[in-house]
Amino acid sequence: MIGDVIITNSVLGILVFLIALKMDKYEKESIASLLKVFFLMIILTFLFGLLKFEIVGDKKFSILVKAYIEAGFFEELLKFSILTFAILRYKGDVNESFDVVVYITAIAIGFALEENIGYFLKFASPGFQWMKLTGDSSLYNEQFNNILVSRIIPGHVLFDVIGVYFIGSTMKNLKKPRLFSILPALICAVILHGTWNYLIFLNSSLFHVYIFLLTIMVTLSVVSLSNQSIFKKMYIKYETLIENNIFLLQSIEINGFNPLALINQLKKIEKNLSFISYLKGKEQEHFVQLMDNIFPTPISKHIQENFQYVEHNLSVIEKELDKYKERKYDWSYYLGIIIAFTMVTFIAIFLIYIVDYIIFGK
């Protein structure tokens, strides 16, 4: 029975985690650190469940309290406590916007795995015991499949990734997240989590609309944080370089030379620097090499030696940035991410049905 749970949960967990790792294109996180956080979350979720049972037991609460306090607040408080630990413990690694997405995904999957095992043990045990006594697996199969359907949507990942947008967005010009930003992230996740549970308790038809809206919000959050990532560091570095050279051109006098044309070239390059956020894969490394190898600095020295060399190299950089500018209107990248997030559930359902067929022969 536990084997069934682990297999079916792992299918979805691996899919979601691979998407997060794939989108962390520029500075990969340590797999060892992520695994430590993942297993720590599993252990603490188990202990949290025991403590919750001891305190709450069979007490009856209103739907709002169960949704927003018992589930939403305390579960999110646990997950974001682990995220805070990860940020402080691995502060050298958590140094760009998308890093918080990768860590919260590992944390959310660890929590969901342990929680789902609890659901299976609680709601599929009668069918499993009946199957052991009689050999009739029909009740167990029904209970097993019902839980799969109700738990297959990765809710914890959805509202936690949306929540950490508040953390990642504070890292635009910083080397690490500001801890005060964890509070609005936590509040956001609590509200989204509570609403998720509340709609489930009411058996509301709006639940499917809510899932769709969360998927869109996750997509926008992930795309935004991915674009803010390491590009900010590159932007600041090259903006400073250009500003220094503009200052040199404005402050020096070279006989027989008017620096205005080169100043205009540099200002155009500076204006288009923001388009490096559209770099993909190894293009980042290529652009860094291009700037380091051919950007004329200090320009004043190169002007005296070879004006054509300076003008040509700046033109090469201009053309390179223009290529990235064209991607501003290329929606294929964003469409691909939206499709990935909306289709992951259908892929997971398909794979789980395959596992179900292999295990139960249905």
Image (cartoon, rainbow, N blue to C red):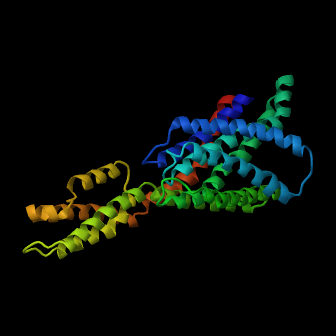
Residue at the right extreme?
59
Q: Quadrant of residue 329?
A: bottom left
- Quadrant where the N terminus is found in the figure: top right
Q: Which residue is drawn at 20% across and 64% down?
A: 314
Residue at the left extreme?
256
49 lies left or right of 185: right
71 lies left or right of 238: right
Q: 275 or 79, which is in the foreground?
A: 79
122 lies left or right of 327: right
Q: In which quarter of the image is residue 220?
A: bottom right
The answer to whether residue 144 of the structure is visible from this angle is: no
Position of 4 relative to 312 (above/below): above
Q: 345 or 56, which is in the foreground?
A: 56
The location of residue 255, given as percent across then percent down, is 8, 73
The location of residue 323, given as percent across then percent down, is 30, 62
Q: Residue at x 90, y 43 (%)?
A: 57
Q: 336 or 13, which is in the foreground?
A: 13
The location of residue 347, given as percent across then percent down, is 58, 45
Position of 306 relative to 136 (above/below): below
The answer to whether residue 45 of the structure is visible from this angle is: yes
Please give the count of numbered marks on the rendered protein. Answer: 0
96 lies left or right of 275: right
- Quadrant where the C terminus is found in the figure: top right
Q: Residue at x 50, y 38 (%)?
A: 30
The location of residue 166, given as percent across then percent down, is 59, 60
